[in-house]
Amino acid sequence: MTTDALYQIYLAHSEVTTDSRRCPAGSMFFALKGESFDGNRFAAQALEAGAAVAVVDDGSVVPAGEQLTTADGMGHYIVVPDVLRTLQALAAHHRRQFRGPVVEVTGTNGKTTTKELLAAVLSKKYKVLYTQGNLNNHIGVPLTLLRLRLDQHEVAVVETGANHPGEIRQLAEIVDPDYGLVTNVGRAHLEGFGSFDGVKRTKGELYDYLKAKSSGRLFVNESNYDLQDMLVKRGIDIDTEKCITYAREQALTMTWNCEGDVVDCSPWLRMWWRPKYGAQQVVQTHLIGAYNADNVLAAICVGLHFDVEPAAISAALEAYVPSLGRSEYRRTERNELIVDAYNANLTSMLAALDNFQRISHPHKMLVLGDMKELGAASKESHQRVADAALESGAEVAWFVGEAFSECLGEMKMSEHVEVRTFEDVAAVKRALEEETPAGKLILIKGSNSTRLHQLPELL
């Protein structure tokens, strides 16, 4: 079946699912395969649950006479060579029917927060489709695009992530963005990228795509040296119409849309900003960390480009409340928590600790989990974080995971910091059954796989 023919079926059944347990009536079920599952085995279950069509790549699961060969046929199964590639091709085809602007957001740190901020700002004027959660990979991106409603949405903001070379290029070919924004580049997923230069090359694949697209444009943080370097190496002049820039403190290019910087961060980020033509404003956010200033400025820059009024931009930023364990501030009965336990790498860890050190509080505590996928840089990276943690002003520092334990060994005390190491989050939970910290400001940060997000309810 051709992509065009499949698209006609999609138009009649535009709810798409890959979970046989969640099949809205009349939906299309795509039987994806993974290392430990085969969606083909659940195609019949999906149809029983309400799906109208099941797209499979194993013909043996199709009962006799049930294969659908035309858009107006009576069968329930569509057999294709590769379900994932078919899903991606369908999403790319659907996206190209959309006439509104599409903004692709990627980067090492802050891409999900930035995507959320962009959506909040643009929603003040437009009907916006944006990536839910962190569905930013080879499966999540096509599922996001297939939620586009051509008669409803006016702008799309699509987040893309990667941990291996070539992935951003592949996703950009599906998204076909009109605009691209790289939040930053840092030392993450080094196991897959090989080096920091590998990170820059991969994130820069978005720049490559939009350089080749004559109408493509880039939103660029002109205060970020690494991003400027990536542009230079691609022969992209930041001071041309190809780039729309924003900057901390003072913009220097002719193409800048806004500038701004931190006013205060104790603990909420408060910052000033001003458009190129307009008055200065001060915005009080619900974000923790000065490192979020770049993400806020990115959203302001994009909003201004799409003619959202400055007052509406500030209102959207002030109303936005982070979730998903990303720089969340929580006050419990006993403590104040900064929960940033969704992900961690060297760059984001050091930024979080720097911000933690700047916050004034009489009793501080750290709960830090191992950083994953750092490859050969893991030992050095964990040592740098451990050293920074012990200089952060914390009275107590709990380190969770094998990598931190190897760095700290049998250390029990460092200067005035009480140090404890734990094998895993389960060991931390057992400790909290015997002792409960109180009256503290606690930063909880680690890679998602360390499961530190399970701790806030115990603190």
Image (cartoon, grey):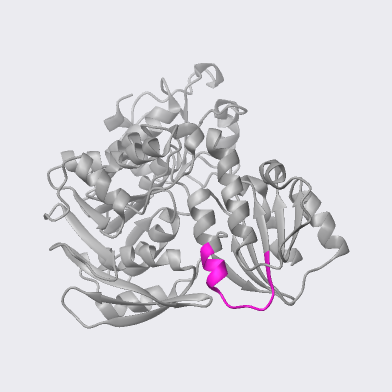
Could you tell me if residue 2 is visible in this image? Answer: yes
Q: Quadrant of the N terminus?
A: top left
Looking at the rendering, the stretch of residues picked out in magenta corresponds to: 354-365
Task: Check the image and name the residue furthest to the right.
Answer: 434
Task: Name the residue: 38% across, 63% down.
Answer: 295
Q: Where residue 299 appears, x then y in whole percent?
A: 32, 65
Residue 284's quadrant in the figure?
A: bottom left
Is 74 situated above or below 456? Answer: above
Residue 262's quadrant in the figure?
A: bottom left
Task: Check the image and name the residue furthest to the front.
Answer: 415
Q: Quadrant of the C terminus?
A: bottom right
- Horizontally, is 358 left or right of 166 in the view? right
Task: Name the residue: 15% across, 62% down.
Answer: 255
Task: Name the residue: 54% across, 33% down.
Answer: 376
Q: Where residue 102 appears, x then y in whole percent?
A: 27, 52
Q: Does 363 lie within the magenta span?
A: yes
- Horizontally, is 247 left or right of 383 in the view? left
Task: Name the residue: 52% across, 78% down.
Answer: 266
